Amino acid sequence: MSFLKVAGLALLFVACIALGVLAVDSVVTKRSPGDVVGAMLVEPPQQHFHKDRIALLMMGIDYNYDDKDQEYSTNARTDTIMAVSLNFPTAENPHGSIGLLSVPRDSDYVFPNGHEDKINSAYTGGANPVAGAHLSEKAVARFLGLNGFDRFVTLRIDAAKDVVDAIGGIDVVPDETMNYDDNWGHLHIHFVGGKLYHMNGEQAVSYSRFRHDACSDPCRIKRQQQVMRIVLKKLENDKLNDLMHVNALIGVIRRNVITDVSDREALSIAMAMKGVDLKAVKMNQVPFTADKILTCCGDVLVADDDAKAKLVRQLFIDPVVPPIAPTAAALAAVSPASITLDVKNGSGVPGAARRLADVLRRQGFSIGTVGNADGSAYSVTQVHVRPSDTLSGNKVLASLPFKGAQLTPDVPGAAKAAVTVIVGHDFADSPQREASAVR
């Protein structure tokens, strides 16, 4: 028997063994073969991002039309802005979860250079779509009080349309009667409120974009979220059932998407989040208290800063599963001298990290490095700790000279210290706290 035949039989034998293992595993674990292959071949997203939660900025940009009726997106603004919290599966949160916070595109925003405009104008400052996306990331993160986004996804208008068409359309009941035509913008919306429509992609996108009512942009966001829920539910039932379908949908989206999420990261996230309960996706929008007129761009919405901060904390900062607080006796048993701290300034206020380090040093903690954090937009002080040593983190949290700091079981970067305290504006901007820090 020739070498090639022997090799061929050997490979066939190995393949049969692999298929047998796959079949047994599929039956025993009650998973589809696609799921089993995915689990064997696709690494968890934590391996890519080195943490259990990432913040992703999702933007939708619209097309303009030139005098020849051709589409172009030069100087386009973001028609849709959504900050997404992706919480990957963990032992405490086995199926993962998703939080979504819509930012009205007409939100009033003051840029670092003092220019006041609608927040969706940030995108126009980029020389290309990627640069525009990065500018939007900075603006939206600053607006929300986040220390940046891990990734961005920019969708052209055809992306949503293609996905809806790819899954055979969706059933939608409009929340009100709509009659609107914009020939220049190629927008034609005619629906009767309360009537069931089986919408194709173009109809679904038109319905989502309608804003010519008393509620305007906030109601448009509600319709976008309504359509998104319907699409997610249909994807859950019809498409996201094995590895091949996940790849097909990623392919559909890729044609109309600009993103810094790699193919491998996208596949890893899709496989990890397959079991998420889409009915439990938390969808909110930034509330506003008033509106006002700007000379540059007309009517803008003024955000409710307190309510906004509360939503951001719930979706992006607070633990997905609240940890069990240690007892007072357990905290008392921990010696401050046994804990080494790195203190980083995340406020941008000069000397804030040093002042808080002095306070903690006087309480007996061992201070490692004192320096700047990876950003200066931290509104709330964060205590980062290795997941295996949350007791030390709670000891530090209880020792801070103010309330409201957040415990995060995730030491950032390659920190050698057991605990890293990132000083936020809640400490740095308070004269009383600064005074107490130097006494």
Image (cartoon, helix red, strand yellow):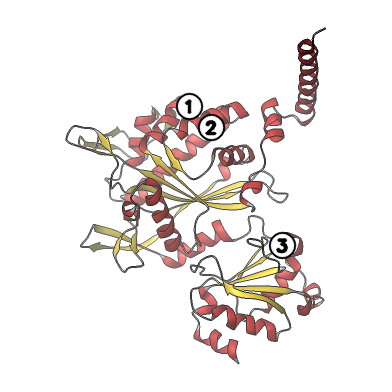
| Residues marked 3 and 2 touching at CB (< 8 Å) | no
Res 335 → quadrant: bottom right
- 1 or 3: mark nearer the eye: 3
Label drawn at residue 386? 3
Label drawn at residue 235? 2
Label drawn at residue 167? 1
| Residue 16 placement (x, y as % from top left) | 78, 18
The amino acid sitting under disc 3 is Arg
User: Which label's residue is closer to the chain start, 1 or 3?
Assistant: 1
- 3 or 2: mark nearer the eye: 3
Above or below for 55 versus 3 = below
Above or below for 66 versus 310 = above
| Residue 419 placement (x, y as % from top left) | 69, 69
Measured Cα–Cα span from mark 2 to mark 1: 7 Å
| Residue 315 placement (x, y as % from top left) | 55, 56
The amino acid sitting under disc 2 is Leu
Quarter of the figure that contains the C terminus = bottom right
SS of the residue at dot 2? helix
The amino acid sitting under disc 1 is Ile
> What is the tally of numbered marks visible in this picture?
3
Badge 1: residue crowd in 10 Å (few <14, some 14–19, many ≥20) = some
Res 3 → quadrant: top right
What residue is drawn where x is 60% and y is 81%?
Answer: 356
